[in-house]
Image (tube, rainbow, N blue to C red):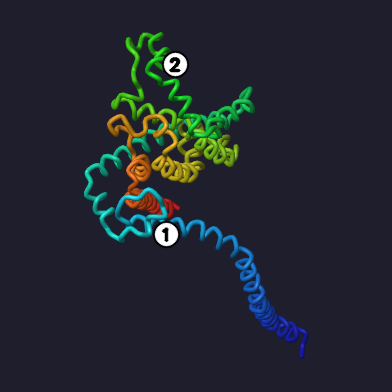
Amino acid sequence: MTDLQTREVAVSQKPNARQQSGKQSAGAGKKGSPSRRRDGLFAYLTLSPTLVVVGLLMAYPFYVAIDLSFRGGRVQSLTEVGALPLTLDNYVSILTDPQLLGDLGRSVVYTLGVLIPAFLIGLGLALLLNRSFPGRRIFRPLVLLPWAVPGIAVSAAFAWMLDASYGIVNAVLRHLGLIQENIAWLADPDSAMLAVIIPTIWKYYPFFTLVLLAALQSVPGELYEAAQLDGAKARQQFRYVTWPAVRTASALSIVITAIGIFREFDFIYPLTGGGPNNATQTLAIRIYNEAFQYFQLGLAAALGVITMLIATAVLAVFMRSLRTQS
């Protein structure tokens, strides 16, 4: 055999060698799959106690709420619930009650009235804090401070500021000549909703600031430099660089906050109790009143289930739209 023929045979054998090595690696992968399965099983076994505890903490209250929502009658203690008959009367009563639409409408107005301004304020402050300026390290914690204050403390402070007789808000407005007489912010049906929206905005805007600031800081500075070299103005930079970077974070924070505001209790009840004349009675306040003022625990539980279904539907629509955009 000549040298040329020998080289040709060697070349023809190289692919076979590669195929054999591929088969060996595939075999090694197959041999390794039981190990991966064991690792996965070990991970599940390690997490199972936590999953069981969390599942019980979530499943049992959910079961109690569902069971309670089908119990008709008035009770003054949870020990009496088991003696109540199972019925659909609670859901029939709620769904045929014209007051439900009013409570739902006020919940939507309250949610949007807080959500939109809080998001815009949070976005503006996030854009500001993303820039370098003197005193930024001091300004950052001050901006986020309202988020750390308990809601009941915020409500007490705003109740004093909005007081019709000695509140600082009326004093400032009179000093500026904007009003001639004191306004009963919390006792007037026309102003009560605004009076509970304002402190809720003050409480929620730091959350948007924190989330959006974290998203902004993940944007490479080179993108802004390239946009400036291309002649992009500030509005164009926001549209084509900033907003795409914070869009997902904005959507997530909006949905999470909207669900929290929709069931908000800490601000409305201490300030107005749902009044005057049900002007600020949202679904959350209605649930509390039915349970602890009228002792209709089954009716309150049914309202809670309906509120949960509404929040779940909103979350499902959001997740679907987010998946479509992705």
On screen, residue 58 versus residue 108, left or right, reads right
Tell me, yes or no, if residue 123 can be seen here.
Answer: no
**Residue 126 position (above or below residue 301):** above
Q: Which residue type carries mark 2?
A: Ile
Pointer 1 and pointer 2: residues touching (CB < 8 Å)?
no
Of residue 289 and residue 100, the one placed in the foreground of this image is 289
Total residue callouts: 2
Q: Which residue is mark 2?
A: 168
Q: Residue at x 30, y 53 (%)?
A: 73
Task: Kindly identify the amino acid type of the residue bearing the numbered disc 1.
Answer: Tyr
Residue 304 at x, y = what percent? 37, 49
Density class for disc 2 (Cα within 10 Å; few <14, some 14-19, many ≥20) is: some
Q: Nearer the viewer, residue 134 or 119?
A: 119
Identify the residue at horizontal 27%, vertical 58% (top origin). Answer: 88
Q: Is residue 77 left or right of residue 103?
A: right
Q: Is residue 249 depicted above or below 196 in this figure?
A: below
Callout 2 secondary element:
helix
- The foreground one among 185 and 6 is 185
Dot 1, crowdedness within 10 Å: few (<14), some or many (≥20)?
Answer: few
Residue 22 numbered mark, or none: none
